[in-house]
Every structure is written in structure tokens, then in C-alpha cells.
């Protein structure tokens, strides 16, 4: 074990699941108030967007997990969460002012296949129906084999 390497990387760092990364939300970098403007400016410069949708629920905890997750077997959490995501999507559509081109869409978690296929369909229909999808769009999802059915695969 190299002690120099250990001490070099033994620092607090933001996780990829937060964007803008945590240090940018306070102090000199405070983007909270200017965020809609930054989104709009970036969209003007490039009308193609990439979306990451975080679906944070899992039925059981993996001991190595470092993800932002919520462990529950209560599937009543699904619908309110999907509705909240679609509300946020509509907020972004208002900021953008026109239908964006979605070149990438990634579902992560948590376990996206914790959600019922009908709820995943509702989420994706709500997003894709108000966007332009190019032929070479890149879509992906994370799944757990124990909770992924044929219906999930068909929906996704
Ligand atoms: S399935 Fe993934 S997100 Fe859920 S507890 Fe395991 S490692 Fe964490």
C-alpha cells in the first residue's frame, strides 16, 4: 500500500450524482440563484442536452454502497417521485423555452427497476413526448437482476 497515494486522495470530494458539484452551491461559487440563467445560456450555445434521472430507491442495502439511495419496500413512494421528476422536467422546459434535443438520457439510482414498468413508462413518455430524439441518441439504465422483469425491459 502506497502511503503517499493514500494521503493524496484522502480528501472530501463531490460525488458524480450531484451536479453542479457540491462546492459550487455555496461560497464564491454560489450558483443556486443563477442556475436557471446558466441553464438557459448553455442551451442557447448548444440545444442538445444530456439528462441524468436519479431514481433513488432500493429494497435492500448493499454493504459497499456509496450511492444516494433510500432503502424501502414501500412501493407507494413511486408515483409521487415520478410526479416530482416530471414537475422538475416541466420547470426546465419553461427555462429552455422550446423542446430540447435529448442526445443522452441515463437512469441511475438507487435501482431504476425498483419502479413498476408502468411508472417508468409514465416517466419516459412524459419526458420524451416533449423533446426531439435524434437517431443516434444514447440511452441507458442501471438495473438489478433480482428486480428486473421482461416487462421492465420492454418498457425501457
Ligand atoms: S442496488 Fe445500488 S444503489 Fe441500491 S444499495 Fe445496492 S449498490 Fe446501493
Image (spheres, rainbow, N blue to C red):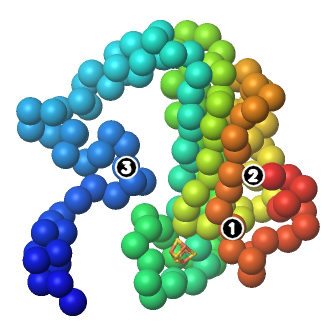
Secondary structure category for the residue under label 3: loop
The 10 Å Cα crowd at callout 3, few under 14, some 14 to 19, many 20 or more, is few
Secondary structure category for the residue under label 2: helix
Residue in the picture at 34% in, 20% down: 38
User: Depth check: 81 or 135 in front?
Assistant: 135
In the visual, does 17 lie left or right of 49?
Answer: left
Percent coordinates x, y for residue 101 in the rendering: 66, 21
Which numbered disc, 3 or 2, marks the residue that appears first in the sequence?
Answer: 3
Say which mark, if any, is on residue 143: 1
What residue does disc 3 label?
Answer: 18
Tell me the quarter of the picture where residue 148 sits.
bottom right
Which numbered disc, 1 or 3, marks the residue that appears first in the sequence?
Answer: 3
What residue does disc 2 label?
Answer: 120
Percent coordinates x, y for residue 15 in the rendering: 34, 58
Comparing marks 3 and 2, which lies closer to the viewer? 3
Secondary structure category for the residue under label 1: loop
Task: Evaluate whether residue 25 shows in this view.
Answer: yes
Amino acid at each position: 500500500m502506497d502511503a503517499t497515494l493514500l494521503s493524496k486522495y484522502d480528501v472530501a470530494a463531490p460525488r458524480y450524482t450531484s451536479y453542479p458539484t457540491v462546492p459550487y452551491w455555496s461560497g464564491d461559487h454560489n450558483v443556486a440563484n443563477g442556475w436557471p440563467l446558466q441553464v438557459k445560456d448553455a442551451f442557447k450555445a448548444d440545444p442538445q442536452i444530456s439528462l441524468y434521472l436519479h431514481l433513488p430507491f432500493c429494497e435492500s442495502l448493499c454493504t459497499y454502497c456509496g450511492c444516494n439511495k433510500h432503502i424501502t419496500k414501500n412501493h407507494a413512494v413511486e408515483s409521487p417521485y415520478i410526479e416530482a421528476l416530471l414537475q422538475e422536467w416541466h420547470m426546465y422546459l419553461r427555462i429552455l423555452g422550446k423542446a430540447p434535443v435529448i442526445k443522452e438520457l441515463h437512469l441511475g439510482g438507487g435501482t431504476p427497476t425498483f419502479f413498476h414498468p408502468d411508472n417508468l413508462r409514465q416517466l419516459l413518455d412524459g419526458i420524451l413526448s416533449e423533446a426531439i430524439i435524434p437517431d443516434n441518441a444514447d440511452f441507458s439504465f442501471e438495473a438489478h437482476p433480482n428486480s428486473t422483469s421482461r416487462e421492465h425491459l420492454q418498457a425501457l
